[in-house]
Image: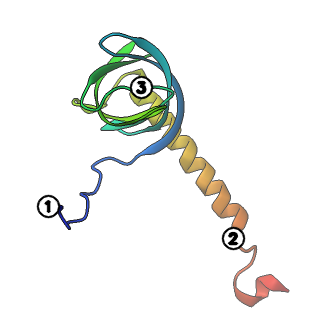
Amino acid sequence: MTSSRPPLPRAHRRTPTDIDVIVNGVLNQVEGRLTDLSEGGARIDGVSMPERSRCEIHYGGQTVYAVVMWAEFDRMGVRFPYELTHGPLHQALERARNTAAIDSAQIFRRNRPSGFGRRGLY
């Protein structure tokens, strides 16, 4: 029997990223790219491991532990059992968020009308 309830909202805001990492599984070490990151998890492209398996993500001298929540042949989504609150990966997340905020502010300024009301059109 399937549930008709909608999925629960995410606890953390996901941010698009482009961060090269090393992912260690039980038997392998693979290079991957974080393309989506939050304090609670990430999407990693170029790597695939079985669902519910545990792995380590290495970046900038930091090791972050993760559990694979879903996997396709060339990417996977992981959840961090310990929230990402500090270290090089958290700093990279903050930089990505700051860059995204600056980019969206520039797009807003570029697309808004130069004047107010009709006076700006003449």
Q: Is residue 95 above or below residue 105?
A: above
Residue carrying label 2: 112
Quote the CA–CA distance across marks 1 and 2: 50 Å
Label 3: element kind: helix
Q: What amino acid type is highlighted by mark number 3?
A: Leu
> SS at mark 2?
loop
Of the two numbered discs 3 and 1 in the rendering, the one whose residue sits closer to the viewer: 1
Q: Which mark is residue 1?
A: 1
Amino acid on which disc 2 is placed? Arg
Mark 3 or 2 closer to N-term? 3
- Identified at 37% across, 22% down, the residue is 87
Question: Is 94 situated above or below 47?
Answer: below
Please give the label number shown on residue 92. none
Of 51 and 34, the residue lying toward us: 51
Residue in the picture at 81% in, 84% down: 121
Label 3, label 1: how far apart the Cα atoms are: 40 Å
Q: Residues within 10 Å of mark 2 (few under 14, many from 20)?
A: few
Quarter of the image containing the N terminus?
Answer: bottom left
* Mark 1 burial class by Cα count in 10 Å: few <14, some 14-19, many 20+: few
Q: Is residue 88 visible?
A: yes
| First in sequence: mark 3 vs mark 1 | 1
The outermost residue toward the front is: 1
Quarter of the image where one finds residue 114: bottom right
Q: In the rendering, at what x and y percent does residue 24 appear?
A: 37, 14
Find disc 3 in the rendering and name its residue. 89
